[in-house]
Amino acid sequence: MTDYISHTPVLLNPSLEFLITDPSGIYIDATLGGGGHSMAILEQLNDDGKLFGVDQDAEARAAAGETIGNDERFSMIDGNFGFLKTIIPPDVHGIISGVLFDLGVSTHQIKEAERGFSFQKDGPLDMRMSELSGVSAYDVVNTYEYKNLRDIIYHYGEERLSRQIAKEIINRRPLETTLELREAIESVLYGRHIIKSVARVFQAIRIEVNRELDVLKDGLTQAFELLKPGGRIVAISYHSLEDRIVKNYFKSGNFDGKVEKDFFGNPIMPIQVITRQIITPSDEEIKENPAARSAKLRVAEKKAEE
Ligand SMILES: C[S@@+](CC[C@H](N)C(=O)[O-])C[C@H]1O[C@@H](n2cnc3c(N)ncnc32)[C@H](O)[C@@H]1O
């Protein structure tokens, strides 16, 4: 196993401040990573508190295990948060005080060239967060038909030149490595923002490989079901597509963002937004940890049944 490249937890203080409403409560860290947030959560829980840490990445789980060590209050779970209800033991369903989602990829996943997430280092086209993912970046880049590839780049990368990039990728098949993919993308770009476009296309392929947007919807819905009334979801997102999903769900309890009304026209609001303003990292945090620059934190609470 490769050495884990350490990951600095993002928005640590505000995320804990909103997450922990009861030091004896039961919590879920749905994106354990290297265990940075989890370690800090455990420090704030008392002896009766409990924490489940979920990650689909074996390297992350191994690193978190080392960081956290032996702590009876902590249980590590191998799995995808899209199946939260299945992987969290049934005896705690409905009594969870808080669920944390620190979305996206870890520093380790980005910097470890072999994982194939980075456009700055050469590596195989992989980008799978779990060895169980159905497709790899290689499959997306080399086997998807033109329309599918174009739409992924357009919708998940929000990249204007999606048609040209998709055509060029197809012309250059087979592409084997991250730098070959980067060269293909760069060859059709012009202007000052080439790197941003490369990053957007890599993001698009990563989202497709890990089905990140659908999984996030499933994760939020299932987290909500696991919460006790008054329990909270704290979500840190890193790009606008994720943030839109979180924002709509927290606003309305669905992904259209439209608040449903009952027979009398009263809004049906199963969930209540706690942070009216999005919370973002300070200039100081961004200076110390540039990976935090696009982070947005939102918090919502499950309402007590009326
Ligand atoms: C940004 S990192 C979390 C870092 C962590 N908060 C820390 O302080 O060390 C995101 C982690 O979530 C994991 N992850 C992303 N999507 C997931 C999913 N659908 N199910 C389980 N784990 C996921 C990734 O493998 C990665 O380790």
Image (cartoon, rainbow, N blue to C red):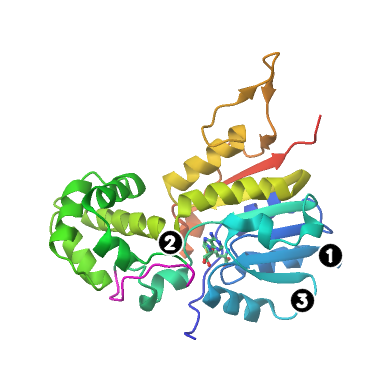
Per the image, the residue denoted by label 2 is: 290
Left or right: 102 as drawn, with respect to 89: left
Task: Name the residue: 73% across, 71% down.
Answer: 75
Q: CA distance from mark 3 to mark 2?
A: 31 Å
N-terminal of the two: label 3 or label 1?
Answer: 1
Q: Position of residue 202 (x, y in %)?
A: 32, 59
Q: Which residues are magenta?
A: 120-132
N-terminal of the two: label 2 or label 1?
Answer: 1
> Is residue 262 depicted above or below 36 in this figure?
above
Q: Position of residue 188 (x, y in %)?
A: 13, 54
Left or right: 9 as drawn, with respect to 43: left
Kind of residue at disc 3: Asp
Rendered-image quadrant of the C terminus: top right
Residue 100 magenta: no
Asked whether mark 1 and ligand 1 are closer than 8 Å, the reply comes as no
Observer able to see residue 281: no
Task: Name the residue: 46% across, 73% down.
Answer: 108
Per the image, the residue denoted by label 3 is: 71
Tally of marks: 3
